[in-house]
Image (tube, rainbow, N blue to C red):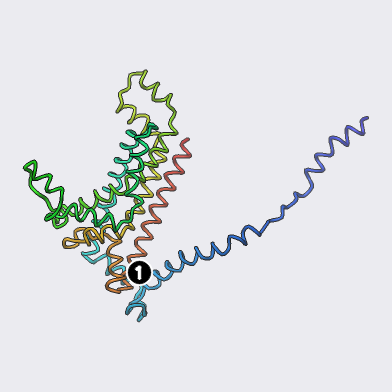
Amino acid sequence: MTNALTLHKAAPSRRAHEAPRREKIDFFPYLLMAPGLVLVGFVTLYPLFFAVDYSLAKTQVFKQIEYVGLANYARLFSDPRFQTNFVNSMIFVLASVALTWMFGLSLALFLRRQTWGTAVLRTIILIPWVTNQVVLALMWKWLLNGDMSPINDLLDLFGLPAFDPLISMSQALPALTFVNAWRATGFALLLMLAGLSAIPVELEEAAEIDGATYFQKIRFIIIPLLKPISLSCIITLTISFFNIVVLPLDLTGGGPLNATEVISLRLYREGFQYYNIETASAITVVLVSLDLFLSWIYFRMIRSEADSK
């Protein structure tokens, strides 16, 4: 009996000293994914290597003439036009993101109840986000045209002065920013609705019992609980707006006098209109670096949010 108990107790210790068995790695799924990974890696990494290589050389269209190091970057950052482009981009992106988030949250609070009417309104609000930007730009170009704008006809009915923001140095960028925020509101609305659906109703009911007003519930309950969703929305929109080309190109063309020429539009012109590949490559590296920096901030925020919980 004693020997049996001794063997029974010793068995786990012997198994503990045994070398763990290595599971065989199944390479077949990776083999199936390999063509897609190679294709994505090629279309992602090759253009980046191309941009870095050409940004360090003096070029004649696609022919590299000589290596110039960081001279293209020095010339770019000392260029007053690029400085204007950078300021325009910062104003355009920050204001667009702020307006889009506020529009999306406000509409989500209004349309959070599931009814037939709210479902129709959600679909209507989402249409601009999925519509081609060329169509939207042409539509707003007609609406904001000082000579034939129906908006000016309405203003004239009320005795208000007409306006033509697309030819005004001070109004063109705000007009472009508003149109862009209007276009992207549907995306923010979807994210905010998803976040609101995850907030327990009991929290809002308890706040009402404690005497909280509607705006106090939004400030102290809804907005803090929507912070992860808001961060995802803000970072995604920021990166998207920094790289937008079609809307400013077709709506304002960067004018008047480069008042609405953002960095992405300058990149398009240098590369595909002027064929200054060295300048376009340098701008590309700057934009990619900016996108990577914003992505790093996003992951830091998400990680700090997770650690705080």
Q: Secondary structure at mark 1?
A: helix
Horizontal relation, residue 192 to residue 181: left or right:
right
Q: Nearer the viewer, residue 280 or 146?
A: 146
Image x and y of residue 134, in percent: 29, 58
**Residue under the point 11% across and 56% down:** 147
**Residue under the point 24% across and 57% down:** 138
Figure quadrant of residue 271: bottom left
Horizontal relation, residue 228 to residue 79: left or right:
right
Image x and y of residue 296, in percent: 42, 52
Horizontal relation, residue 151 to residue 271: left or right:
left
- Which class describes the residues within 10 Å of circle 1: few (<14), some (14-19), or many (20+)? many
For disc 1, the marked residue is 281
Image x and y of residue 297, in percent: 40, 49
Q: Is residue 89 above or below residue 220?
A: below
Q: Nearer the viewer, residue 122 or 255?
A: 122
**Residue under the point 75% across and 50% down:** 21
Q: Is residue 50 above or below residue 173?
A: below
Figure quadrant of residue 121: top left
Q: Is residue 222 above or below residue 301?
A: above
Q: Residue furthest bottom?
A: 65
Image x and y of residue 270, in percent: 28, 70
**Residue under the point 88% across and 34% down:** 6
Quadrant the N terminus occupies: top right
Horizontal relation, residue 161 to residue 100: left or right:
left
Q: Type of residue at label 1?
A: Ser
Q: Total number of numbered labels?
A: 1
